[in-house]
Image (cartoon, rainbow, N blue to C red):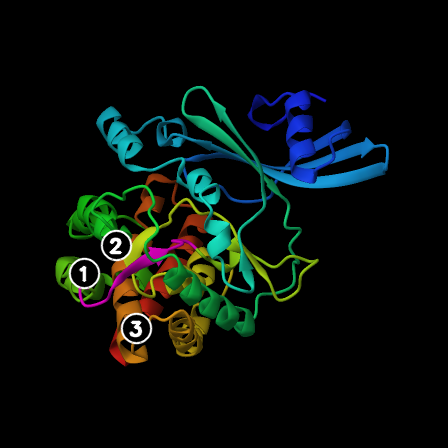
Amino acid sequence: MTGLPGGLATDALRDDLRRWTGRPALTVDAVDCAPLPHRISAPTTRALTRVRVTASDGTGTQELRLVAKELQAARHGLPPEMPDDVRAHLDAVIPWRLEADVLTSGVDALMPPGLRTPDVVALHEQDGDRITLWMADADPVGTPWTPADTVRAATGLGRLAARRIGTTTAPIPGGDFLTGYRDEQLGAWAVPWLLDDATWAHPLFRLPEVAVLREEVCGLARRVADVHARLAPLPLLPAHGDPTPMNLLRPRSRPGEFVLIDWGMTGPAPAGFDLLPLLFGRAESGTGPADEVPALLEAAVPAYAEGLAAEGVELPVGELAAGVLTAALLRYPCTTMPLSLMTEPVTDGAMARARERAAFVRMVLDLEHTA
């Protein structure tokens, strides 16, 4: 029984399990570790491991299922070819331990009915700015995500945002997510690249499905500041930051409930921001069709407003809907264009991904025209 996530000793895991289960005589008989099937894109996540523990005491044998998430400072997970100054900047501005701090801050007591955080079993600090977060495995069902799931999640996220008003988290560069996004992802990267003629000479950008977007996308890139300014009337509310359907687990043992995971992007954002990953997340990742988004918006925006109202925060549905569409324009089209694919070989797979991204961008741009 060696090689536990984060270099944890079996005796330390046993002590954690004793505290968590309330069984002081518990012994660890066997441990099985396997990588959790999940595409890791954040530089602050080193590994995700599903851990199955066979344990026993005088009352019998029990199987305990855990997930270990190894968090690290961003510098450990950034590409080695990245310039040192860029690496140092990102390492300084990305709050790598935010998820662990939030989950151990008492946020679980603020969760509304039907929504909960993962059960934290233990938190282990390691040298070199690394942490391993041990959580109970939610054992989620694998059945398809439905529009009804989206509406229930939207209501819960609205209630949660209202309940978290007044709580504090680690500061975000720029003060809130979308301001930081405007300055970092857009201003320092996507906008300059999109306005460079050399970008559109790349084979992926010469694909008809991509090239046809040039005028609209570049027009949007030039007015990013104006689009962002349109969000000023909306209140800033605490947001989870990334509640995609993949991060809203539906536990097998508790139908009708969501376990909200991946809190590494939590922070203040314009009201309704959490609807973006909820509604657009499947299409953005290629796990759902882009044409599902308009109907989801129509159902989920009122549900989110109802969630806010249930906790005493009144916001007109029309203002909320306009804000969500504005935030989507800021968040998606420019950075979803196949800029990151330009460093890869131009293969059939890369061209297929570029076309898929172009279809997603087309859908988001069309939402502005139909609003």
- Residue 141's x, y, as percent? 66, 58
Q: How far separated are the C-alphas under marks 3 and 2?
A: 16 Å
- Residue 181's x, y, as percent? 25, 50
Tell me which residue sits at (58%, 46%) in the image. Answer: 119
Residue 258 part of the magenta segment: no
Sequence-first tag of 1 and 3:
1
Which of the image's four quarters has the C terminus?
bottom left
Sequence-first tag of 2 and 1:
2
- Residue 67's x, y, as percent? 61, 40
In this figure, which residue is indicated by the disc labeled 2?
178
Q: How far separated are the C-alphas under marks 1 and 3?
A: 15 Å
In this figure, which residue is indicated by the disc labeled 3?
320
Task: Check contact, mark 1 vs mark 3: CB within 8 A.
Answer: no
Specify the segment rendered in magenta: 232-242
Report the side of 176 relative to 136 (left or right).
left
Tell me which residue sits at (53%, 73%) in the image. Answer: 147
The foreground one among 337 and 85 is 85
Instruction: Give SS at disc 1.
Output: helix
